[in-house]
Amino acid sequence: MTKSIGLFTITLFFALISCSDNESKESTDIPAEKPSNVFYVRTVPISQSALDDVIHVTGVVQSDSEAKPSFKTGGVIARTYAEEGDFVKKGQLLAQLNMTEIEAQATQAKFAVDKAMRDQQRVANLYRDSIATLEQYQNAGTAVDMAKKSLQIAEFNVAYSQVYSPIEGKVIKKLMQEGEITGPGIPVYYIMGVRQSDWKIVAGLTDKNWGRIKKGEKAKIILDAYPGWIIESEVKRLADVANPLSGTLDVELGIPSKDNRIAAGMLAHIEIIPSINAEYIIIPVEALVSSNGRTGVVYVPKDGIAEKRMVRIQQFQGERVAIESGLEGATEVITAGSGFLEDGDRISIEK
């Protein structure tokens, strides 16, 4: 009996050891759980490449010939000879001042000249008789010269008491009316040249794009008013100073076609083909978390943290995206897993 109990005890002991070994072995086969506060992502390196790309920009139709004629002197406007919407020729009379005061000033200046000349003659006679001094004689001559200059000014004001059109164009706005009092240099009309040769398109470029194009380079223009009409054009002028309102550098293009009517203020979509190909950062399209027009969001790894970058997109090329700016200093971008990230999340890069 004692021998049977001892044998049972030994058998039970080895059975327990065997179960313990199996449990230990099974526990080592279970992989460790990944930390819940770390995002596992994949990355790809950034590359640079020169693109034979086209510059896309939006511009506005403007006139290359504008004028705001005004009177040289102030006064009451007696007559106006053009209304809004009228076409006027260069040199055409547009308005005239009431001449009563201005002609009176000219007459007064003429009387002053006559008096100065009589005084000079009287002093000359006295000087010959040694009664008047040389200084008095010279002063009389100076008075005559001053009176003549005053008459010259008055006659000049009479001549410029009328407004003539300095250009051929259309009266866009009549700024002053008959009977109003105007001052020197205050515009009376706003005239715009509307001939085919007067039209141009002005668009603002970034510094980088401005530096890539030259005068005479080819461009294509599509006006919003005529979607199917493609205008072949070229760069006429490049600004030397940045626009103080937008901070961009303006480029001007001509509109050589005469197929359709054109008006100032029309919007135009422009494609300029530069002769200098620029290098851009190239990333896969899956690295782009979101995009809105020319801007997008990309995440880059930095010391185990996901850093959010706002990028400016130059253009899409199939499965690749050319980035103009926003990835300075980065060497790689996050692709797989980027859609779940927030700025500052902890990441682990899986190879």
Image (tube, grey):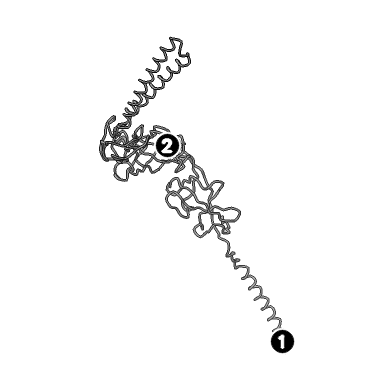
Residue at image point 42% right, 20% down: 143
Residue under label 1: 5
**Spot occupied by residue 314 in the image (x, y as percentages of width and height):** 45, 45
In the rendered image of this protein, does residue 51 appear above or below residue 310? above
Label ID, residue 67: none
| Horizontal side, residue 49 vs residue 254: left or right | right
Is label 1 in contact with label 2 (beta carbons under 8 Å)? no
Amino acid carrying mark 1 in the image: Ile
The crowding category of the residue bearing disc 1, from other C-alpha atoms within 10 Å (few below 14, some 14 to 19, many at least 20), is few
User: Can you name the residue that lies furthest to the bottom here?
Assistant: 1
**Spot occupied by residue 278 in the image (x, y as percentages of width and height):** 47, 39
Q: Is residue 45 visible?
A: yes
The alpha-carbon separation of the residues under discs 1 and 2 comes to: 99 Å
Number of disc labels: 2
Q: Is residue 66 visible?
A: no
Label ID, residue 274: 2
